[in-house]
Image: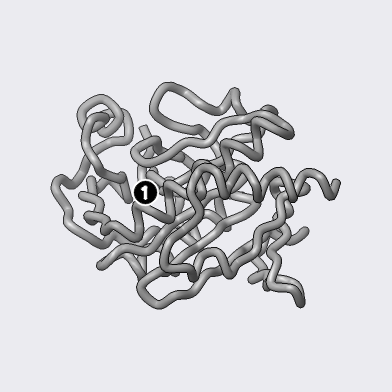
Amino acid sequence: MIKVLDLPQFMVRISGDIIATDVSYEDFMAGYDEMHVEWVNGAVIQMPAIDEKHDAFVAFLRMFFDGFLELTTGGRVLGDPVLMKLENVPSSRAPDLQVLLPERLHQLRRNQVIGPANLVVEVVSQGSRRTDTVDKLREYEVGGVPEYWLFDHLRKTEKFYQLNDEGVYEDVEPDENGLYHSKALPGLVLDVSLFRRQKLPGFWEIATLLKKLLSKE
């Protein structure tokens, strides 16, 4: 059983619509696996609703990651409500997207990933800004997620965090050409201006982007 008292050095803030408290992680996995919820310090939290733009961001990135992995290393792209349970972090989150490279596929157990994914993406929703930008940022850092992408389409901002050698997130900026270079997914380079477009790329444009990207390697 996972208890908050086992981890006095790191407490996770509970926020959001609490639908149950004093729930062990085992009971959470057994009784709430078909609901859109997360587990934080023994509390079951109802996740906020998303809007059309949030859905479009996730759909674009999932297609992009799927294509990139198929053409390069292989692996899996997993979406909400697949959970990620990090060691030494008393919470179990359902990231909008998690990317697992082949060497971490063994961490996938039915509806959860045990341990950090190679890369995690969160898109801010109404009511989730503090959770995504502060709480999850800290949890993913402590839990050893190598790379965290955070998109706030409501404020038209994007952040890219990479763990340094000391296990601390660094806010990595795009290069002088507006291109972001992933560290967790070597060879992945993305023009951040795409995220500010009114209409995000669809299947055929993503295929063209990947063809151009991989032809440069």
Q: Which residue is drawn at 65% across and 40% down?
A: 68
Q: Find residue 37 and report its horizontal and vertical position in percent.
A: 26, 44
Q: Is residue 91 above or below residue 128?
A: above
Provide the secondary structure element on which disc 1 rests: helix
Residue 146 appears in the rendering:
yes
Q: In which quarter of the image is the N terminus?
A: top left
Q: Name the residue under label 1.
A: 4
Q: Residue at x 67, y 29 (%)?
A: 74
Residue at 41%, 63% in the rendered image: 132
Answer yes or no: is residue 9 visible.
no
* Circle 1 crowding by C-alpha within 10 Å: few under 14, some 14–19, many from 20: some
Q: What residue type is labelled 1?
A: Val
Residue, x 31% and y 29% (percent of image)? 26
Q: Nearer the viewer, residue 49 or 144?
A: 49
Residue extending farthest to the left is 19
- Residue 145 shown left or right of residue 7 in the figure: right
Q: Residue 111, image x and y in percent?
A: 39, 27
For this rendering, which residue is in front, 16 or 63?
63
